Image: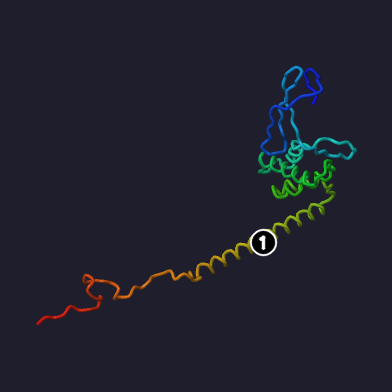
Amino acid sequence: MHCPFCRHADSRVVDSRTSDDGTTIRRRRQCPACQRRFTTIETASLSVVKRSGATEPFSREKIVSGVRKACQGRPVSADDLALLAQKVEETLRGTGSPEIDAYEVGLAILGPLRELDEVAYLRFASVYQDFESLADFDAAITSLRAERAEREARAAESGTDGGARAAEDAVAPDGDGAGTSEQPADAVDTDGGTGAAGDEAPVRG
């Protein structure tokens, strides 16, 4: 990389550090000509192709900004939005493509947003998917209700199975003979080891 100070055509890396989320590498470089140091940030390329055909670098900040409008008045924190943007980026990078269509970005937002807040999801989806009538909202709400009912049914079934297994474990025998053990009466020495516990002392006349 060219030195930003003297424009020398080369530089050497003197230190490298990876960001906490592992998506970027911060490199400290030194110019061999002027000896001045500068920092570069290295990241994997991911561009968004807009409707006009123009491309721009993917930005988590833009994801957060767009979703924040749909979340106005909802119990959604800044940390929730940051995590949502991270999930969206991970989904897009998981495709392995360096360029993603803007429409695909919107699709990647819908899933995490639906899990985060259903009202915010409906707001975002109504704009993104161009809802034109109440029927569109009704269809989206029906789909949300069906998904919620399915999740609740799975949770209830899981809880029932877990309770049944716990009950079976509670009544099952230990299998190792654990419990109160009885010891033969004649094994207990009550007279100094001279006889069994049930023997009577001889009567002398």
Residue type of the residue flagged with mark 1: Arg
Residue identifier under label 1: 154
Question: Residue 164's quadrant in the figure?
Answer: bottom right
Q: Is residue 68 above or below residue 146?
A: above
Q: Nearer the viewer, residue 201 or 67?
A: 201
Q: Is residue 88 above or below residue 17?
A: below
Q: Residue at x 75, y 44 (%)?
A: 88
Its colouring scheme is: rainbow
Q: Nearer the viewer, residue 174 or 160?
A: 174
| Residue 27 placement (x, y as % from top left) | 72, 29
Q: Nearer the viewer, residue 109 or 69?
A: 109
Which quadrant of the rendered structure holds the C terminus? bottom left
Question: Residue 128's quadrant in the figure?
Answer: top right
Q: Is residue 159 above or below residue 8?
A: below
Q: Residue at x 21, y 70 (%)?
A: 192
- Left or right of 4: which side holds 172? left
